[in-house]
Image (tube, grey):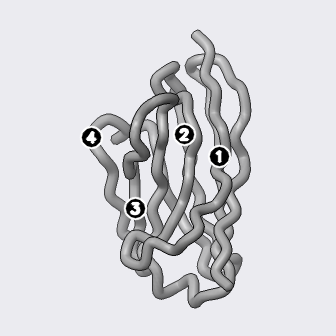
Amino acid sequence: QVQLVESGGGSVQAGGSLRLSCVLSGTIFRLNTMAWYHQYPGKAREMVAHILPGGNANYVDSVKGRFTISRDNTKNTVYLQINSLKPEDTGVYYCNSLNNQYRPWGQGTQVIVSS
C-alpha cells in the first residue's frame, strides 16, 4: 500500500526557515517525479515545486529563490527547504508523485508564519 507521510512544519516568524520532509513508501520512489503542494487556508491546493527522478527541479515563479526541493532516493524522501518565510506561505504542505498522484494523500504538514 502506497503511503505518503509529511513532517517538519511548525510556527515561525516571517523571515525564518523550515525544512519539510516527505517519505513515500509502498512503491519505487526513485521512479517518481515528486512534487510539493501548498494549500493556503480556504484556497485550493497548488503545486509549488517538483523534482524529476534525476534531480532536476522546477518551481512556480512565486517561490523561486526561496524554496529548494531535493530528494534522497536512498531514503525514499523528498525535502522542501523554505527560506525567508512570508505570511502567505502559511498553510498545509503536501507531497505526492506528480506522474502518479497516489491516493489517499498524506495528512500534510502545517506551516504557520506570523508577521
Query: Residue 54 at what x, y percent from top left?
Result: 41, 80
- Label 1: state its secondary structure: strand
Residue that carries the numbered disc 3 in the rendered image: 50
Which residue occupies the foreground of this view, 18 or 111? 111
Q: Nearer the viewer, residue 96 or 58?
A: 96
Residue at 68% across / 85% down in the picture? 1
Mark 3 surroundings: few (<14), some (14-19) or many (≥20) residues within 10 A: many
Q: Position of residue 114 (x, y in %)?
A: 62, 15
Judging by the rendered image, the residue that carries numbered circle 2 is 82
Residue at the location (48% across, 55% down)? Answer: 36
Mark 2 or mark 3, which has the lower sequence index? 3
> What residue type is disc 3 on?
His
Looking at the rendering, which quadrant does residue 12 occupy? top right
For mark 1, what is the residue? Answer: 19
Q: State which tag comes first along the sequence, 2 or 1.
A: 1
Mark 4–mark 3 Cα distance, whole angstroms, equals: 13 Å
Residue pointed to by mark 4: 61
